[in-house]
Image (cartoon, grey):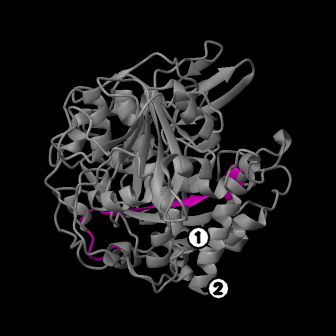
C-alpha cells in the first residue's frame, strides 16, 4: 500500500473501532474461557537462565533503590554496572510479576507493567553482550516473567554484536518489545489493537523508570524499520511459530549506564544498522509455545491496521520532523514531598484501582505536581528532557482534557493541560467558544493548565467513560487528546501507534504519581469517543481522544488474597 492508502486504512480502523452511546466497537460478544490465551510465552527447547530472585541485594551486586524523587533529578543516581543482579532488578521493575491474586481456587498474576484487562500482550527481549552468570558470548534473550528468567533465543558472535552496538556507550544493550494481538482481541475484538499500543507505552515507561533506579539511560531507536526489529528478535522465523500465535514487532530501545566511557551523539542518526540479515545469528534456540487451545478468532481489521502502521525502511527518525524546540528550563512546579519513598516500593506496590470511594480528595499542590511530571520540558534532543520523556524522539502530541472532581482548593470542572504550550492557541480555537481559559489559583506559571468551565463534571465523566463509576468517583479523571490528523499526514501512518505509546507513557507516570500521593490510578480504555470530543467542542479529526485515566481513593476487594510474586507456592518448578 502507498502512504495515502495506509493513512486511509488507519483512519478507517480508528473510526470503525470507536464506541458510541448506541453501539460499541465490534467485539467477541462473549468470552470463550476455554480458549483464553496463556499470558506467559515460552520458547520450548531454549536454554533457560534463572535470574537472581527479586529481593534485597548486597551492595556489590546492585545498589539499593534510590528515593522516588531522585529519579527526576538528573545525575542524582550513579550509574550501576551491567551485572546479572542489576539486570534482574531492571526486569523485575519492568515486566515481572508484582503479586498474585487469588479468589477461591482461581489465581492470577499482576505485573509491574499494567495491561488492558490484565491480558498482557507485550513480550520483552534483550540483545546483550557476554555477561557473567548469563552467558559467555553475546546473545538474544526472551524474558519469561513467570519464572523471572531469560531464555536464550539466539547465539550472536562477538564481532556481530560489536557491529550492532557501534557508536553506543560502553555496556549498552538493546531491549525489544513485541505484541501478541490475540491476547487482547480474545476479549476486546477489533479495538484490541489500540490497547496493545497502550501497553507498549506502559512497558516503555516501566523500562525507563526501572532503568532510572540504576542510573541508566533508555532511548527509543525510532529510526529503525519494523522489518529490522523483526529480524533482530526473530519474530519473522516462521519455523519457530509454526503452531503458535505470532508476535508483531513494536519497539527497540537502547539501554546503557550513565557516566561510563563513551558518549552517544544523539543529534546523529542511530548507530544501529538499518538492515539486519536474519541469517547473521549463529544459531537459534526454541520454538514458541501455543497460547490458546483452538485457533484464534481472526479479526481482519487488526491485521489491516497492523500492516498499514508498519514502519518502513526509508523513514527518518521522528525527531527529524520537528524544528521547534521546547523550553527546557521549566519544572519549578515539581515538589519533593514524595522524595523520601523508595522508588522500588512504589513500583512494586503499583496496582490498577478497581473502584473509587467517591470521597478521597488530593491537595492542589499534589495535583499540580502530578501534571508537572507529565510535561516533557525539553528540546528535540531527548537528553535535554526530564525522565522519562528523554526516551521519546518526538515533540509531545498528547494533551489532557481533565474532569476535576475532588482537588482541594481547585474549582471542580473541565480543564485543559497543553503538554506542548505552543499548541495552546490551536486547542483554544478548536474548542467551545464559551470556555473561559483562566488560570486556576496557585497554578505554577510554567504549567499550561487552564480552567475551561466550572461545574460538577462527575456524571459527565462517568457517562463518556462507558458509564464507569471510576471516572466520576475519583479525585480527577482525564481524556488524552492526540494531535491525530496532523500526525498521520505529516509523519506517516506508522506514527498512529506512537500516539498510543505516548499516551501509555503518560499513564505509567500517573500510576506512580498516584502511588506516591497515597491514592491509586487506572487506565480506562472504554470510552465513547465522539461524545468526548463533543464535551470539549472538538469537531473533525484534528484531535482525537485515545486513552482515559482516573486517579482517586481505592476500594479494595476483601474477597481477594494477595500472594508473593516469587516463592515456593507461586513459582513454577
In the rendered view, does 368 fall on the left or right side of 161? Answer: left
Residue 107 percent location from the top left of the image = 68, 27
Residue 170 within the magenta-colored segment of the rendering: yes
| Residue 359 within the magenta-colored segment of the rendering | no
Q: Nearer the viewer, residue 59 or 508?
A: 508
Outermost residue toward the front in this view: 434
Q: What segment carries the magenta color?
A: 165-184
- With 79 as the anchor, is 209 left or right in this view? right
Q: Secondary structure at mark 1?
A: loop
Quarter of the figure that contains the C terminus? top right
Q: Label 1: which residue?
A: 234
Q: Which residue is mark 2?
A: 1
Relative placement, left or right, of 23 versus 556 is right
Residue drawn at point x = 35 percent, y = 79 percent:
163
Distance from the alpha carbon under mark 1 to that under mark 2: 24 Å
Residue at the spot x=43%, y=40% of the render? 402
Q: Is residue 80 above or below residue 340?
A: below
Q: Quadrant of residue 85?
A: top left
Amino acid at each position: 500500500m502507498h502512504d495515502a492508502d495506509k493513512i486511509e486504512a488507519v483512519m478507517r480502523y480508528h473510526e470503525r473501532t470507536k464506541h458510541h452511546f448506541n453501539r460499541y466497537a465490534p467485539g467477541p460478544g462473549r468470552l470463550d474461557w476455554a480458549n483464553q490465551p496463556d499470558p506467559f510465552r515460552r520458547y520450548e527447547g531454549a536454554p533457560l537462565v534463572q535470574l537472581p530472585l527479586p529481593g534485597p541485594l548486597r551492595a556489590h551486586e546492585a545498589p539499593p533503590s534510590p528515593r522516588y524523587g531522585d529519579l527526576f533529578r538528573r545525575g542524582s543516581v550513579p550509574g550501576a554496572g551491567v551485572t546479572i543482579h542489576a539486570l534482574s532488578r531492571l526486569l523485575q521493575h519492568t515486566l515481572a510479576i508484582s503479586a498474585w491474586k487469588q479468589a477461591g481456587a482461581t489465581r492470577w498474576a499482576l505485573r509491574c507493567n499494567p495491561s488492558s484487562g490484565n491480558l498482557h500482550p507485550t513480550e520483552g527481549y534483550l540483545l546483550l553482550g557476554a555477561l557473567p552468570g548469563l552467558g559467555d558470548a553475546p546473545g538474544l534473550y526472551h524474558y519469561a516473567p513467570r519464572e523471572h528468567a531469560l531464555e536464550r533465543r539466539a547465539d550472536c558472535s562477538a564481532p556481530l554484536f560489536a557491529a550492532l552496538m557501534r557508536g553506543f556507550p560502553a555496556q549498552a544493550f538493546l531491549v525489544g518489545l513485541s505484541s501478541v494481538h490475540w491476547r487482547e482481541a480474545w476479549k476486546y475484538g477489533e479495538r484490541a489493537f489500540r490497547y496493545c499500543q497502550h501497553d507498549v507505552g506502559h512497558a516503555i515507561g516501566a523500562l525507563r523508570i526501572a532503568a532510572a533506579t540504576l542510573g541508566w539511560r533508555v532511548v527509543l531507536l525510532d529510526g529503525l524499520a519494523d522489518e529490522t526489529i523483526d529480524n533482530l528478535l526473530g519474530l519473522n522465523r516462521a519455523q519457530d511459530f509454526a503452531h503458535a500465535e505470532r508476535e508483531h514487532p513494536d519497539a527497540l530501545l537502547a539501554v546503557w549506564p550513565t557516566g561510563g566511557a563513551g558518549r552517544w551523539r544523539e543529534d546523529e542518526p542511530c548507530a544501529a544498522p538499518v538492515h539486519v540479515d536474519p541469517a547473521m545469528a549463529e544459531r537459534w534456540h526454541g520454538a514458541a509455545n501455543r497460547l490458546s487451545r483452538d485457533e484464534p478468532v481472526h479479526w481482519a481489521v487488526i491485521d489491516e491496521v497492523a500492516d498499514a502502521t508498519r514502519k518502513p525502511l526509508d523513514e527518518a527518525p521522528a525527531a527529524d520532523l520537528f524544528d521547534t524546540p521546547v523550553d527546557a528550563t521549566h519544572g519549578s512546579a515539581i515538589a519533593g514531598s514524595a522524595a523520601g519513598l523508595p522508588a522500588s516500593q512504589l513500583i512494586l506496590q503499583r496496582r490498577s484501582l478497581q473502584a473509587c470511594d467517591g470521597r478521597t480528595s488530593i491537595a492542589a499542590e499534589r495535583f499540580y505536581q502530578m501534571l508537572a511530571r507529565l510535561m516533557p520540558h525539553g528540546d528535540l534532543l531527548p537528553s535535554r528532557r526530564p525522565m522519562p520523556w528523554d526516551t521519546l524522539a518526538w515533540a509531545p502530541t498528547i494533551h489532557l482534557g481533565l474532569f476535576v472532581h475532588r482537588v482541594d482548593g481547585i474549582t471542580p470542572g473541565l480543564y485543559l493541560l497543553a503538554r506542548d504550550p505552543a499548541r495552546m492557541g490551536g486547542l483554544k480555537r478548536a474548542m467551545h467558544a464559551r470556555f473561559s481559559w483562566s488560570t486556576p489559583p496557585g497554578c505554577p506559571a510554567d504549567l499550561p493548565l487552564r480552567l475551561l468551565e466550572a461545574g460538577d463534571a462527575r456524571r459527565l465523566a462517568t457517562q463518556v467513560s462507558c458509564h464507569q463509576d471510576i471516572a466520576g468517583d475519583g479525585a480527577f479523571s482525564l481524556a488524552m487528546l492526540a494531535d491525530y490528523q496532523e500526525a498521520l499526514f505529516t509523519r506517516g501512518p506508522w506514527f498512529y501507534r506512537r500516539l498510543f505509546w505516548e499516551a501509555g507513557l503518560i499513564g505509567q507516570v500517573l500510576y506512580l504519581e498516584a502511588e506516591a500521593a497515597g491514592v491509586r490510578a487506572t487506565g480506562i480504555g472504554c470510552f465513547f469517543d465522539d461524545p468526548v470530543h463533543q464535551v470539549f467542542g472538538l469537531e473533525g479529526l484534528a484531535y482525537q481522544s485515545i486513552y482515559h485515566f482516573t486517579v482517586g481513593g481505592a476500594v479494595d476487594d476483601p474477597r481477594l488474597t494477595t500472594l508473593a510474586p516469587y516463592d515456593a507456592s507461586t513459582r513454577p518448578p
